[in-house]
Image (tube, grey):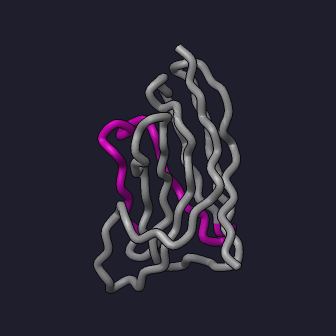
Amino acid sequence: QVQLVESGGGLVQAGGSLRLSCAASGRTFSSGFMSWFRQAPGKERELVAAIRVTPRTTYYADSVKGRFTISRDNAKNTLDLQMNSLKPEDTAVYYCAAKSVEPWVRSTWTSGYDYWGQGTQVTVSS
């Protein structure tokens, strides 16, 4: 059974930093996508950052470019999101998601995810 477990959320002041981690078990995701989504109250869920394991490529939403960094540790089967210069508008529940896709298959960043974590709350105070 595949499980994604997020950790690292919390309360931080604007301008501060947080690091989210997602530990995957039950599947290695040596190919495919691992991503961070977020959902703020009253808003739709949005893709924040994603990484395609093979070939290694990354995606960032415009709103977080230059502030957030996504990274993947294949040996540990984990996914991290380093969030710097946090803003109140970054407040949301952050979800780790994953999908297995063969390296030669085209796939979109934003949809088709098979596995989701339970979410971790990030609150940025002004």
Is 8 placed above or below 85 here?
below
Residue positioned 47% across, 24% down in the render: 87
Q: Which is nearer the eye, 118 or 15?
A: 118
Q: Position of residue 31 (x, y in %)?
A: 48, 79
- Please say whether residue 108 is one of the residues in the magenta stretch: no
- Quadrant in which residue 102 is drawn: bottom left
The residue sitting at 59% across, 19% down in the picture is 13
Task: Indicate the quadrant where residue 50 lies.
Answer: bottom left
- Closest to the observer: 79 or 115? 115
Which image quarter: residue 8?
A: top right
Q: Count numbered badges in the picture.
A: 0
Residue at 46% x, 75% y is: 32
Q: Which contiguous range is marked in magenta?
A: 56-77
Residue 22 placed where, x, y %? 64, 57
Q: Residue furthest front?
A: 42
- Where residue 67 appears, as percent x and y from the top left, is 43, 35
Picture quarter with the N terminus: bottom right
Q: Is residue 51 left or right of residue 120?
A: left
* Residue 52 picture location, percent across and down: 42, 68
Residue 65 within the magenta-colored segment of the rendering = yes
Picture layout, residue 20 above or below residue 55: above
Is 19 rendered above or below residue 4?
Answer: above
